[in-house]
Amino acid sequence: MRKGRYLLKRLIYIIFVFFIISILMFTIYKALPGDPVKMMMGDNVKPEVYQQQYDIIREQLGLDDPIPVQYIKWITNMLRGDFGYSTEYRRPVKDVIGVPMRNTVLLNLFSMIIVFAVAVPLGITTAVRKNSIFDKFIQVITIVGYSVPSFVIALLAIYLFAIRIPLFPISGVKTAGFEGTGMAAFLDSAKHMILPVLVMSVGGIGSITRYVRASMIDALRMDYIKTARSKGLREKVVIYVHAFRNALVPVVTVTTWWLIGLFGGSVVIESIFLWDGLGKMMITGLSQRDFAVVLAMQMFYVILSLVGNVLMDIAYTLVDPRVRLEN
Amino acid sequence: MKKKKLLSMFLVAAMTVSLAACGGGGDDTVTNNSDDNSGDNSGSDVQDVAGTEAINESVSGTEAAGGAPAGDRPDTPSGQIVIGSMTDLEDDFYDTNYTVTATNYKTYNIIHGYDTVVTTKEGEWITDPTVVADIQQAENEDGTKTFTITLNDGLVWTDGTNVTAKDYVFATLLESSPEMMGVDNYSGTNYTQIDGWDAFSSGETKNLKGMRLIDDKTFSLTVSAEELPYHYDLAYAGVRPRPLAVIAPGCDIVDSEEGASISGDFTTDVLLETIGNTDTGYRYNPQVTCGPYRLESYDASSRQGTFVVNELYAGNYEGMKPMIEKVIIKTVTAETEINELKAGTVDLLFEISGGESIEAGLDLVDAGVAQKHTYFRNGYGLIRFDCSQFPTDSEKVRQAIALCLDRNEFAKKYSGGYASIVHGDYGLAQWEYQEAKDWIDQNLNTYEKDIEAAKTLLAEDGWTLNADGSEYSGEGLRYKDVNGELKPLEIQWCNTKDNPVSELLSTMLPEAMKEAGMDLKATTVDFPTLSAAIDHQGETIYNMYNLATGFSLQHSPWYYYGMDEKYMGGGYNSSWIKDEALASAAEALKTIPLEDTEQWLEKWKELQVVWNQKLPVVPLYSDEYHDFYSNKLQGWDTTSIWDWSQALLHAWVTE
């Protein structure tokens, strides 16, 4: 009952925050200097008819309305699933963001799998073997991993694995002119994905390994670990059942943000590897004052963040029974 | 401690290797003009940037590692090339009214064709003899002019049906109609010159008065009197056909005394399906076209387009047909484009800019891995003044600023030695420049850096006071008495971020201007903000901007220096200059007949002299573009007015 009331309150909170942020975002973007209609028209229109065309397009896009009216129209349409009209691509936003979103999610999903598959065992192992040579070596590597800028790692990876040893393509999503389908198409795409996924994973592995290590070290210091060991439990059971479970709470936080981040594109990675994703789309949208695209993406991230927080709270209760969902 | 040292060394080594190895650091483009958004370049063997002399001997040139003579050109299409483009290819294949990206712009040329009027490789306007059997021009009593055009036989669409006069008339009606403007805000301004366009485009009439369908092979186009006389009037007869049966199925072209009209179910809803359907619409997936290539496929996730040769294509104005069977366009990035060429994942990189990228490409040429072709850009990077804003409303202040910059040194530093400078309102690929090179060198002020001369100009302009109103001491900021108010000589400069031109100007200009008694105040913004400022949207603050421009083949200075409000902003008179002498000099060109090149050149020179004195703009550099391409590509010959989409028709590949 308490849980239900808590979730209801959180839902009301989410709706309230969503509307406040939507007003703020809309107002901020509308206040930015730069004219989307002018960006849309380019310089190709003869001056004799420029103003006439300009006025027609402005009216068609509803940009002549007062800002509050524009907001109400925009938010109403958005709640109906109509995310607006892209002035850059001259088509509905929903027709524009589908492919980049798929590319971004694909890249981030594989990256996340690799990060957690490597970082969690590595974090546990380094915690268990704290201060050993292995632990120190991994610590150095992980510091390098998350402190070196991703564009440097990307260029280094391209140089090593695409130029010096040409195992992977330099950039792109598919081979130019490739006509295969099914498994062949998947393999071609996978080949192009390996380098960007690896580069994206380096930073994540570095930070999450250290995160898991720190949590595990704290957990391994607890009295219940000593109790478990004194009961004669096997070390694996002590580590994975008793210690790791208690170390999970901070890991859940990180995992939730990674899940939310699945939909957030990396401008650097996408630009260097020419992986057409949401990060690049966001930058293009901003530079072209394509507010419908930018606002749709921003609000999507707002919803993800708000819902993600609730999911995180629920996840805490699952990994730690002491946590209760209540005010 | 040792571990820390090792770690530091590793990091430094890693960064150095990665940055050096991946070639071509890639200068950011400073070209924000849509005419020239493909990049900004410089380079070649020409290291001298001292002036126009540098380019006299080398307007374009090819140094091939494996070039083959033209006689080896095959007579059937074969092979493929992958073209690497710095801008994405969008799935938008109609025309510039939808998408103006440089790459899409070029694909319009390769999939659409049979324009009645084209420009030659030399930039001359002609009727396309492959398309037009006959063109008659008649000047009417009411001041209008009628072009009657008869088409050749043998022009067919890719589906094998004939291209008829109806398709040409349909194109003008379609692209002027209010129905079409309802399809994703199409800016239907392709045919504004046609008599009766206003009434037709507003929906007032169903007939376009100036278009007549005479028979299946003949149509006429009447240009309204307001548009005449006009130097490029032949361009007004230019029509690109659209397939009536595909875009308006069941409709027909009906001719009457009131002009041509479209009969049948011609509505925005129909067009939204035949043009706007994202899977099958003509905008996204045009399958019935008539250019040298046809669209085979577009992959949205990789933004790659594949084009195959149109076997039914009758040829360009020279009768040339493409001999490269397949063309694939993919995006490349400045950081890795040269590596892509080396790896063989692209075959052609065009309009390469920046010293680092050019040097990396030249290394491939030296190694025999690639070939190169160079040509000068038909435009330049520039400082644009706002001539409506105090104190740059004074030509002497503008001239003084120009005298504070060593433009030769600037061009050299910016381009790594691969650029030239110009002194007027012209591009290096324009025929007028080619004809008047010597005259330009003798008659235009080159504004060599001369701070003493700048000081003299400022003194002549009344900047002779100190902050306290006393006579200028010779040091510090100058002031001027303007209607009893002391005003400082402050220049507000708006520039864009991450822009190497801005950065270089920041190091070369402020000190020199300070020495002359000026204060340069810089503000860095993003491009849309700069663009809005140029257009005077919001408060007008700035005196100067740095950006770039390109000259089209229909260069119309009467727009750019016209004093009417309609020319201000909108990409035309962006300097907001209202100068009688300049406007008159520009306007004088407008009415000169196209064939009277002698008179045109004389008036053009007069314009350059006035422009050079009024100086609404300071040209900074004009780059030399480099095309780098694989050894399998033969017969490659581009210029800045004959781009890759046109050069493709002369080229072939040897596998």
Image (tube, coloured by chain):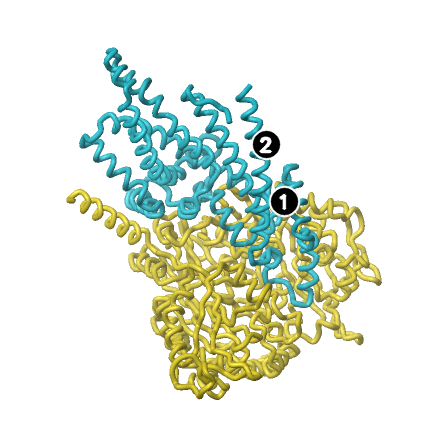
Q: Is residue B189 above or below residue B300?
A: below
Percent from the top left, x then y, of residue B66? 35, 58
Percent from the top left, x then y, of residue B237? 68, 66
Does the CB distance between marks 1 and 2 fall below 8 Å?
no
In three-dimensional space, the C-alpha distance between marks 1 and 2, rounded to whole angstroms, equals 26 Å
**Residue that appears at 25% across and 18% down:** A226
Between B307 and B389, which is closer to the camera in this rendering?
B389
Tag 1 subunit: A
Q: Work out which residue is located at the far right of the displayed protein and give it.
A: B257
Label 2 amino acid?
Ile
Q: Is residue A218 left or right of residue B506?
A: left
Between B385 and A156, which is closer to the camera in this rendering?
B385
Q: Which chain is cyan?
A: A
**Residue that appears at 64% across and 47% down:** A71
- The colour chain B appears in is yellow
Residue A84, which numbered label?
A: 1
Q: Is residue B522 above or below residue B440?
A: above
Q: Is residue B647 visible?
A: no
Q: Is residue B416 visible?
A: yes
The residue singled out by tag 2 in the image is A12
Q: Quadrant of the N terminus of chain B?
A: top left
Q: Is residue B410 left or right of residue B170?
A: left
Percent from the top left, x then y, of residue B195? 76, 66
For marks 1 and 2 on the same chain, the one whose residue lies earlier in the sequence: 2
Q: Residues within 10 Å of mark 2 (few under 14, many from 20)?
A: few
Query: How many marks do you count on the picture?
Result: 2
Tag 2 subunit: A
**Residue that appears at 48% across and 77% down:** B434
